[in-house]
Image (tube, grey):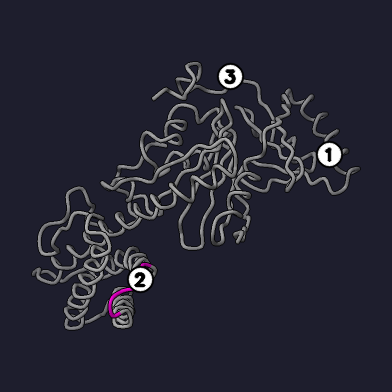
């Protein structure tokens, strides 16, 4: 059944030799690229060092900026649309801005078709990669994908030639990025890590894909990308959860009064995902008992930290008890999902002794 889609205001070497190095736009001239979209009408992407002037020209022509640096002009009223186009060409002529017409499909339409073909509800946010300062490009460079796959291989060298990107956020928190290869316009799809700390972990990263058509892209995403993404998420959450339990054990047996809030924040960032994963992976032997055990673990591992010392010790014991059961159940599904590290030893190498969301200093440079 098609997915629901919501939009929000946002062997041989396949890479050609003439695009082998990252380079600025081929001309210093500010440009506006126009594309025809069945969903949005005329889509305009300003680019170049004077893109502020291009955006001003679009605003004066009554184009609406619906996402970062992406303007649209509905075609519901032909007279209004023709007036807007005439105004735009007049403004660009006065401002010295070049207008290009592209026959390539708009990436937003491609992303919408992919989202509708995937299970669940996906929210779409778009971004113009051609702006001098682009949040979308920064986000694209932080994609969590196999190092030699088509997406990172393209973004490492050719991101300045890529027009736009779409980010698809699933209701369960997974995020996909959809863009295109600039020389052959193949669709590229990759995964985004929900926590920046995941980028530094030693896990098998999700597999990015390239496809010549939307149906082929949907097939590869369903068969290859999403299963590898889910596996990587389990591995990453489990590693970070293990590291947190190590810190919980140290706090329980340490001489100093523990800081409970950072531990609680870290548990809440990883335990719910692992528990949802276990609920979805049944049936379990004695499934009713297992489900009840997971419900108790969820309550314990997401509870607010207590204020007094006696309750603190009890809470730490509950966290260790329920946390150990969760990790054992995850590993029972796949013993090779991660290397087991006992909670009563030192933290796993390379894992930061801090809750997720703080910088590890290992994210790719923007």
Closest to the camera, between mark 1 and mark 2, is 2
Tag 1–tag 2 contact (CB < 8 Å) = no
Q: Looking at this view, name the residue that lies furthest to the top.
A: 18
Location of residue 300 with respect to 170 vertically, above or below: below
Q: Does residue 284 belong to the magenta stretch?
A: yes
Q: Residue 241 is drawn in which quadrant? A: bottom left
Q: Which residue is mark 2?
A: 282
Q: Which residue is mark 1?
A: 84
Q: Marks 3 and 1, Cα distance to the nearest angstrom? A: 28 Å
Magenta region, main secondary structure? loop
117 lies left or right of 41: left
Q: Position of residue 162 (x, y in %)?
A: 56, 32
Residue in the picture at 83% in, 39% down: 84
227 lies left or right of 128: left
Q: Does residue 171 belong to the magenta stretch?
A: no
Task: Judge the density around disc 1: few (<14), some (14-19), many (≥20) Cα neighbours within 10 Å.
Answer: some
Q: Bounds of the magenta span?
A: 281-286
206 lies left or right of 338: right
Q: Position of residue 155 (x, y in %)?
A: 46, 33
Q: Quadrant of the N terminus?
A: bottom right
User: Which mark, by number, is residue 26?
Assistant: 3
Q: Position of residue 234 (x, y in %)?
A: 32, 58
Q: Earlier in the sequence, mark 2 or mark 3?
A: 3
Residue in the picture at 76% in, 43% down: 63
Mark 3, secondary structure of its residue? loop
Q: Earlier in the sequence, mark 1 or mark 2?
A: 1
Mark 1, secondary structure of its residue? helix
């Amino acid at each position: 059944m098609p997915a629901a889609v919501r939009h929000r205001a946002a062997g041989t070497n396949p890479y050609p030799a003439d695009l082998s190095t990252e380079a600025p736009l081929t001309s210093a001239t500010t440009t506006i690229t126009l594309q025809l979209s069945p969903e949005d009408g005329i889509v305009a992407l300003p680019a170049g060092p004077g893109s502020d002037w291009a955006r001003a020209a679009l605003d004066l022509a009554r184009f609406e900026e619906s996402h970062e640096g992406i303007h649209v002009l509905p075609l519901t009223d032909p007279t209004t649309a023709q007036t807007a186009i005439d105004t735009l060409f007049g403004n660009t002529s006065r401002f010295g801005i070049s207008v290009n017409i592209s026959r390539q499909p708009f990436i937003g339409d491609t992303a919408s078709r992919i989202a509708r073909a995937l299970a669940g509800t996906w929210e779409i946010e778009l971004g113009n990669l051609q702006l001098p300062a682009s949040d979308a490009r920064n986000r694209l460079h932080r994609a969590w994908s196999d190092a030699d796959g088509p997406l990172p291989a393209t973004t490492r060298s050719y991101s300045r030639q890529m027009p736009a990107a779409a980010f698809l956020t699933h209701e369960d928190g997974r995020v996909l990025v959809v863009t295109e290869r600039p020389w052959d316009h193949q669709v590229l799809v990759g995964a985004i890590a929900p926590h920046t700390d995941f980028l530094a972990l030693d896990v098998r990263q999700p597999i990015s894909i390239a496809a010549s058509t939307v149906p082929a892209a949907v097939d590869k995403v369903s068969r290859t990308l999403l299963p590898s993404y889910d596996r990587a998420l389990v591995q990453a959450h489990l590693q970070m959860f293990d590291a947190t339990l190590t810190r919980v054990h140290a706090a329980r047996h340490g001489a100093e009064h523990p800081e409970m809030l950072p531990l609680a924040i870290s548990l809440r960032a990883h335990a719910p995902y692992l528990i949802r994963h276990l609920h979805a992976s049944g049936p379990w032997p004695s499934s009713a008992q297992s489900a009840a055990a997971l419900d108790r673990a969820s309550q314990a591992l997401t509870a607010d930290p207590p204020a007094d010392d006696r309750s603190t010790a009890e809470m730490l014991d509950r966290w260790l008890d329920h946390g150990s059961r969760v990790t054992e159940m995850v590993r029972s599904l796949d013993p090779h999902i991660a290397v087991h590290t006992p909670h009563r030893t030192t933290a796993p190498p390379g894992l930061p002794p801090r809750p997720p969301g703080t910088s590890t200093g290992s994210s790719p440079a923007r």
